[in-house]
Amino acid sequence: MTTAEKLNADRLPAHVAIIMDGNRRWAKKRGLPSVAGHKAGVESVHAVVRFASRAGIKALTIYAFSTENWSRSKLEVSALMFLLKRTIISYAEELDKEGVRLMLSGRISELPKAAREALKAAEERLSHNTGMVLNIALNYGGRQEILDAVNAALASGVKSVDEDSFSKLLYSPSLPDPDLLIRTSGEMRISNFLLWQTAYSEFYVTDTFWPDFREKEFTKALVEYQERERRRGK
């Protein structure tokens, strides 16, 4: 039986989150500039989003740019922002055909104007779709998200919050917590990603660099997820 044949369509995770790591190391291994790894990583995004949507996954969150990534060289950050703008403009039509709805998580207002406007236009274009939700975490940090939620609670004047009311103050309150968190490139850390939401997520780490992560690798992660028993602390 192949890996794909082991996949049970009735036991898919509703929400998958991915830390897309390894673009720069993929490029370095091939003697290429970092931006070449980021460009190759875009192809994996296309493949993974298409596969997840057609497989029946309800929501997919991808970690595209963290608040810490601003510390990289100006050249790399500029290239990333240009690539982001170009990708979202060209990719919106394909997402529309797939029925995917776009959601943005993070401090989007702090992104460069051109990238921000392209993202907002795509989000509006895809807002009426009823298929899988693609949630892109941009200028995102888990600690920053929690702080923003705390400050929103304080500004509202409430004296206390519970888990439910606090969750509604996060960047993407309409999404359920991720069932599965995937990290590529073999790093064993969460890197300030969805700190509140992943309290009981299943973690899957692969040594595969993100530009090489496609349908086959994604299927392996889903099969392993389905073989686990989720207790959620019980």
Image: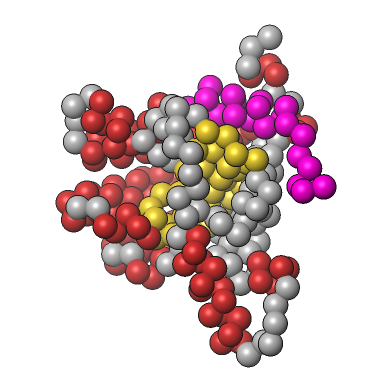
Magenta-span inclusion, residue 221: yes
Is residue 34 placed above or below 157 in the rendered structure? above
Give the percent coordinates (x, y) of residue 90.
Answer: 36, 45
* Viewer-closest of 11 and 194: 194
* Figure quadrant of the N terminus: top right
Give the percent coordinates (x, y) of residue 152.
Answer: 56, 80
Residue depicted at 23% across the width and 30% down the height: 28
Is residue 13 placed above or below 75 in the rendered structure? above
Residue depicted at 63% across the width and 90% down the height: 157
Region in magenta: 214-234
Tell me which corner region of the image, top left, top right, bottom left or bottom right, holds residue 224. top right
Query: Left or right: 195 with respect to 76?
Result: right
Query: Is residue 121 something that shows in the picture?
Result: no
Magenta-span inclusion, residue 28: no
Give the percent coordinates (x, y) of residue 186.
Answer: 45, 32
Query: Is residue 34 something that shows in the picture?
Result: yes
Query: Left or right: 122 with respect to 10?
Result: left
Is residue 14 placed above or below 192 in the rendered structure? above
Give the percent coordinates (x, y) of residue 83.
Answer: 29, 47
Residue depicted at 58% across the width and 42% down the height: 181
